[in-house]
Amino acid sequence: MVKEIPLEIEIKLLDQFIIGSGNPSVKGADIALSYYLDHRGRRLLPTSTFKGILRKACNRVVKLVDSNWKPCYEIEPGRIKSMCIGSGYEWLESFGIPGYTEHIWNSLIFDELEIRSPHEIYTYTHTSISLSTQTVKPGALYTVEYLPPYTCLKAKLRLLVKERDNEKIGLDKSKVIKYLKLILLAIMESPVIGIGRNSKPFEIKIVNTKEIKAEIEKIGLKLDKDIEDLLNVLSKPYSPFINSRG
C-alpha cells in the first residue's frame, strides 16, 4: 500500500489578486480562470495555480539538491514533453509530464487551492469610453472579481512513497529525503516566483511540520539536519520581501 507524506501549506497574499473569471478580454488578470465551489461549499482555485509556482521554483534550486539534475524552464506542455525528458530531469517526473505516460507516475499530488479567509471576494467593473462617440468601447465593459490583500489560501500536496518495490506509484524510500529537500527548498523559493500572471507577492508557511516528521519516522527514515532546518524556517510565515513573523 502506498504511503503518503502530507504537506499542508498556508499562503497569505500581500497584494490584491485579480480573478479573470474566464473572460479573455480582462486586462491585468492574475489568473484567467474563475474560482469554483465544491460540494462542501469551499471556494477553490485550479490545482495548476500552485503546482506551476512550485515547478518553477524547483528549477531554481535543483542544483542545490543534486548537481546532476537540470532545470527545465519550459512552460508549454508539448515542449516539456520534448525538451525535458531523460537524464537530469528525473525530478520533473514527480510533477507529471504532460502527454507523457510511458512508465512515469507522478509521486507528487496537488489538491486544489482553497480560498480560506477573509470570506469577502470583491468585484469591480471596468469600462473605457470613446471620446469621439461618448459610448463604451466594444469589449471594454466587464466585471472582474479580486481577492483583497492578506487573503489566506490553503494548499495541500502529498508526496507518495512506495511500501513495496513492485508498486508502480510513489518514490522508493531511498529517494524520499532527497525529494523532500527539493520540495521544501522550492516552497521557500516560491515567494520569489510570485503567484499568478503578474507574480503577486505572498508569504508562505507549512502548518503541519510535526505531522511531516511523524510520517517520515513511520516509514522508517530519519530526517537530516538540512530538512530539520528547512522545516523550522517554514513553520513560521516566510517571505524574502518582509520580515518573517512568529
Image: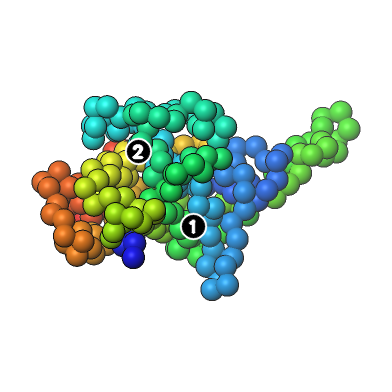
The C terminus: image quadrant? bottom left
When the figure is inspected, residue 118 is found, relative to residue 228, above or below; the finding is below
Residue 67, horizontal then vertical, whole percent = 24, 27
Q: Which residue is mark 1?
A: 112
Crowding around mark 2 (Cα neighbors within 10 Å: few <14, some 14 to 19, many 20+) is many
Residue 168, horizontal then vertical, whole percent = 39, 53
Residue 195, horizontal then vertical, whole percent = 46, 42
The mark lying in front, picked from 2 and 1, is 2
In this image, 97 relative to 58: left or right? right
**Of callouts 2 and 1, which one flags the residue occurring earlier in the amino acid sequence?**
2
At a point 71% along the width and 39% down the height, the residue shown is: 25
At a point 56% along the width and 40% down the height, the residue shown is: 99
When the figure is inspected, residue 185 is found, relative to residue 210, above or below; the finding is above
Residue 70, horizontal then vertical, whole percent = 34, 27
At a point 34% along the width and 62% down the height, the residue shown is: 2
Residue 146 appears in the figure: yes
Under circle 2, the secondary element is: helix
Between residue 204 and residue 219, name the one nearer to us. Answer: 219
At a point 53% along the width and 60% down the height, the residue shown is: 44
Give, as a three-letter code, the residue at label 2. Answer: Trp
Give, as a three-letter code, the residue at label 1. Answer: Glu
| Mark identifier at residue 91 | 2
The N terminus: image quadrant? bottom left
Question: CA gap, disc 2 to disc 1?
Answer: 22 Å
Identify the image quadrant of residue 60.
top left
Residue 15 appears in the figure: no
Under circle 1, the secondary element is: loop
Crowding around mark 1 (Cα neighbors within 10 Å: few <14, some 14 to 19, many 20+) is some
In this image, 205 relative to 39: left or right? left
